[in-house]
Amino acid sequence: MSIRPVKQVLQARPTLEGAGVKLQRAFGFGNTTEFDPFLLFDDFRNENPADYLAGFPWHPHRGIETITYVLAGSVDHGDSLGNRGSLGAGDVQWMTAGSGILHQEMPKGDPHGRMHGFQLWANLPSPLKMTKPRYQDVSATDIPEIADDDGTRVRVICGDFWGKTGPVEGVAADPRYLDISVPPGRRKRLAVETSRHAFAYVFAGSGTFRDASEPRGVLTEQIGGPAPVNETGNRSLVLFDAGDEVVVQAGDEGIRFLLVSGQPIEEPVAWYGPIVMNTQAELREAFAELRAGNFIK
């Protein structure tokens, strides 16, 4: 087995989106080649309703899939196709924008005012850019959760893992999306297919992700300043190099993180705002259709 070394550690950065929602962005709107097929990852965690209630009013998407995973509070959503609904704690929405959709997402806090969730954007390959839009709304109760002998727990949102299959299916990038909790002090080996790009996003506790050949405690430079590259805590994103296993060592409080992997599409990306195509000509056409009122097919 080949353990994946850590290529980079990124700390999520404060970002303002929608109508004034304060969130943390781990990657996006830059050179995302190393994350291919993924384009953007946001952590919308907040305890002040004034920082999120304005939400994400009506906006378009084309050429991508958006994956929303809610941990606390709820997100009311609606779209130009007449779909309406609400995502609660533990629920997932996997939206394939395809040829184009207008939608809105309006977050609401729990009884204590807390709102927490993630949004991931996955690219669509060129033959599927103009596919028919669709939703996969998944209830928390339909997401399988596995408990290992050492207390490690895994929610399988998409893909196959430890004999369980997540409820989201038919996604172009054939991704695996896992929510993993490792108890304090435990060391865990987690399989990841060699051909996939993979990253982990830590959102509770702390721990280390390291190559087996790397001495414990080695310090290297983190994006944004000197830091122990493998000592990862809240809002740290770990980008892995090639290999077929990820190794995590949980800290004194344990660690909880998302482990996401997908097959690279390896196509040109022409991207502006919420629309992602392959060429600048396609991008100009999409915005021309928006202005002309014939964006929805």
Image (cartoon, helix red, strand yellow):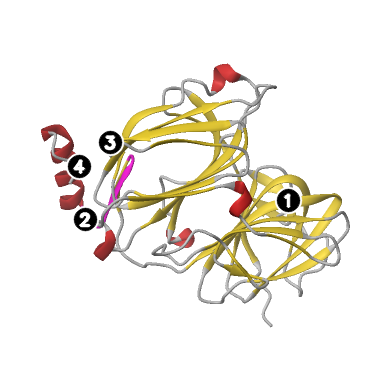
Q: Closer to the N terminus: mark 4 or mark 1? A: 1
How many neighbours does mark 4 have within 10 angstroms: few (below 14), some (14-19), or many (20 or more)? some
Q: In this picture, is 210 found above or below 137?
A: below
Query: Marks 4/1: CA distance?
Result: 39 Å
Do the residues bearing badges 4 and 3 touch, measured as CB atoms within 8 Å?
Answer: yes
Which numbered disc covers residue 80? 3
Dot in front, 1 or 2: 1
Q: Residue at x 50, y 64 (%)?
A: 175
Q: In this picture, is 15 found above or below 169?
A: above
Do the residues bearing badges 3 and 2 touch, measured as CB atoms within 8 Å?
Answer: no
Q: Which residue, as the protein is rendered here, is positioned at the far front?
A: 141
Local SS, label 3: loop
How many neighbours does mark 3 have within 10 angstroms: few (below 14), some (14-19), or many (20 or more)? some
The segment highlighted magenta reads 273-279
Which image quarter holds the N terminus? Answer: bottom right
Query: Marks 4/2: CA distance?
Result: 20 Å
Which amino acid does the dot numbered 4 rest on?
Ile
Query: Marks 4/3: CA distance?
Result: 8 Å
Local SS, label 4: loop
Q: Closer to the N terminus: mark 1 or mark 2? A: 1
Which amino acid does the dot numbered 2 rest on?
Thr
Dot in front, 4 or 2: 4
Q: In this picture, is 221 found above or below 189?
A: above
Whole-percent x, y for residue 98 in the image = 29, 52
- The residue tagged 1 is 256
Query: Marks 1/3: CA distance?
Result: 36 Å
Which numbered disc covers residue 296? 4
Question: In this view of the protein, which residue sits in the foreground, 142 or 235?
Answer: 142
